[in-house]
Image: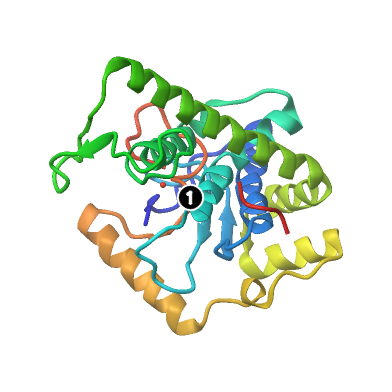
Amino acid sequence: MVFAGKEKKDRILGKEEKKIVAYHEVGHALVTTLLKKAEPVQKITIVPRTMGALGYVMQVPEEEKYLRTKEELISKIVTLYGGRAAEEIIFGDVTTGASNDIEQATNIARAMVTQYGMSEKFGLIGLESVQNRYLDGRTVMNCGEKTESEVDEEVMALLRQCYERACHLIEENKDVLHELAAYLVERETITGKEFVRIYEEATGTKLKEDENKELEEDKKEELEETGNKENQESGEDDGIRSIGAGCGRDADADGQDDIPEDH
């Protein structure tokens, strides 16, 4: 769970920057919706937060999970790259807003190769061990320099494939991307119900029933209570669960942002 802090309404984004952030966040939401086994989008906002994020997408899993499949991890990486892909395709340029997304995607890909045995090249070999798991989580490579270099190449290849997948999904769904982004620029926040309505009207397709329904009230209350409790401990009030830590960070703000077939 990632908390981005309370709304910071005195931070006003310029017109162009607001548009970029909107496309970035909608890029995340659209890509995750197009992938299998995606958690339903519950909220998209481009209202800046006190902890530095300029926007975020909130998703809530329908059930608690402790294990992740290879397919789910790849989908996560593709989703993390959805914001950067939208920026590049729509504006022909990229910003610093994806820095935390890239960091998280890299960490997932590296763990897949070195710790989870999910690499075709290396197979079931533990190439990296985690030390001080309950402190700083520092990792140590258990291989020579040549193998370590090959690990880097394998990680980069996986990340490239995931980014290309994100770009393909964005390119193939630009019409709905434009509609969602325009709505977000105007309203600044989109609920899960609004997201589903716009998506279905723009694409002429219906999302799966489990993706289409709103959270039950008790689940919403549980999320809010959990977020408030966590943020009270860290000095913040407004809790969220997001795809990453949101688009963009102030230069002085600390914080971190966490190839299946299409439908």
Please state which of residues 107 and 52 is positioned toward the viewer in this rendering: 107
Q: Position of residue 181 (x, y in %)?
A: 72, 47
Q: Position of residue 133 (x, y in %)?
A: 17, 46
Please state which of residues 253 and 70 is positioned toward the viewer in this rendering: 70
Q: Residue at x 15, y 48 (%)?
A: 134
Q: Which residue is mark 1?
A: 73
Q: Residue furthest top?
A: 146
Please state which of residues 263 and 183 is positioned toward the viewer in this rendering: 263
Numbered disc total: 1
Q: Is residue 42 above or below residue 150?
A: below
Q: Quadrant of residue 254?
A: top left
Q: Position of residue 106 (x, y in %)?
A: 43, 34
Q: Residue at x 75, y 33 (%)?
A: 90
Please state which of residues 186 and 92 is positioned toward the viewer in this rendering: 92
Q: Is residue 118 above or below residue 158?
A: below
Label 1, secondary structure: give it.
Answer: helix
Q: Position of residue 186 (x, y in %)?
A: 72, 51
Residue 188 visible = no
Q: Residue at x 73, y 24 (%)?
A: 92
